[in-house]
Image (spheres, rainbow, N blue to C red):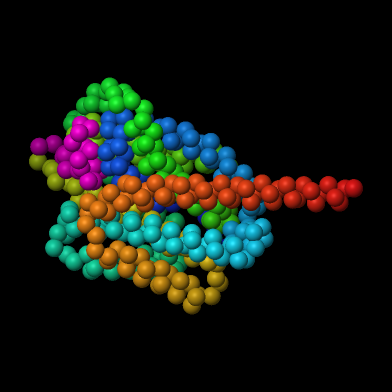
Amino acid sequence: MKSKDTISIFQMILLFMTGIGLKNHVIAVPHLIKTAGRDAWISVVAMSILSLIWGLLILYIYKTMKGQHIRKWLEKNIGKLFTNILIVISGFYLLVMAAVTLKETIMWTNVSYLLSTPPLILTILFILPCMLAALTRLQTITITNFFFLLFVVIFGFFVSFTNMQFKDYSLLLPILENGPLPVVKAMIYQGTGMAELVFLLVLQHKFRSEFRYRHFLISVFILTGLTLGPLIGAIAEFGPTEAAMQRYPAYEEWGLARLGKYVEHVDFFSIYQWLAGAFIRITLILYTLRVLINKKSKKINLWIILSASVIVGTLVAFPIDERVFFNMLMHVLLPLTFWFFLGLSIFFGIIAFMNRRKKRGDNDVQET
């Protein structure tokens, strides 16, 4: 039976556009450019094509689940013990993802516009609304996301078209000047965002209508565009060498934006974009954790989200040098995200295959 708190496929796509889009649009771009240089866009396109193949596995798992809650589906196929172990591991990784997003947001805030504000204060002020939003319904989150995303998209097109005067697309050439190896290495950074589409398997029991492959295709197309936009823009505006040295290329592009001769310094719009994306992303992660644990009691849900928020805040408050954090993201956390979600989807695929095989065997026995 479907829950009353359901969303449409269109709302789901918009939710992923904001939540996963922040990672593709902001977090992954500097690592892509640093690894592959001017050829980073090839890595994005190549990984997007591979994602379409991976999408067939996701659709296969989705059809096998038949609208069941993921926890019940897992308990039915691998037992409660292994289900609990898997949920604990997945839940911890979700908290790490939320902490990484918040840490990036706090670091950027301290560097760009609130230079003297203590990070602890910023962490508390930001995690509180995310915590409260995660305690609401999924419908509430998607409606909020719609209004946030509307202006995020408007501002995105604004900076893109405004900066056309500064773009030199010849800087994207020559192609593969350092060979294919850097392109292959950089693919994992685009893949780390695409792999998060596995979230739809956790939320699929909330869909009002059937999820189809074309919906996955649309999601991949949007997320690819969200990476290519700031990526190509940064290379065309600053060149591959300068862009590779920038910590936040998407934000630096706002520094060039102006309207005519007299209206400039409009980079405050980027603050709205980043904070809106981070809010939806962290809220979605906390809500997904709540769905995984699957408790109906409001008090238990409150303690789940409160405890998760405290853990995220503690991880963010842990002092770490920005350069060390960047290297940790590049060499550990982002690749680990890709392999974790890819491995999780393959594991789900094996369960789905065994489930269908078992049902066929049962049907054959009944017929005989």
Height in image: 84 above or below 260?
Answer: below
Q: Could you tell me how many numbered marks the image carries?
A: 0
Q: Position of residue 81 (x, y in %)?
A: 60, 66
User: At x 37% / y 42%, what residue is drawn?
Assistant: 189
For the N terminus, which image quadrant? Answer: bottom right
Quarter where residue 172 is shown = top left
Q: Position of residue 99 (x, y in %)?
A: 34, 60
Quarter where residue 206 is shown = bottom right
Tell which of 139 and 124 is nearer to you. 124
Q: Is residue 58 left or right of residue 18?
A: right
Looking at the image, which residue sits at the far right? 368
Taking the image as drawn, is residue 45 in sight? yes
Q: Is residue 124 left or right of residue 60?
A: left
Tell which of 279 and 192 is nearer to you. 192
Height in image: 7 above or below 226?
Answer: below
Looking at the image, which residue sits at the far bottom? 299
User: At x 54% / y 40%, what residue is drawn?
Assistant: 55
Range drawn in magenta: 239-261
Tell which of 368 and 122 is nearer to you. 368
Taking the image as drawn, is residue 164 in sight? no
Q: Is residue 366 left or right of residue 174?
A: right
User: At x 29% / y 26%, what residue is drawn?
Assistant: 178
Q: Position of residue 321 (x, y in %)?
A: 21, 57
User: At x 29% / y 58%, what residue is drawn?
Assistant: 103
Quarter where residue 245 is shown = top left
Tell which of 271 and 185 is nearer to you. 185
Magenta-colored stretch includes residue 157 = no
Height in image: 307 above or below 226?
Answer: below
Q: Position of residue 232 (x, y in %)?
A: 29, 33
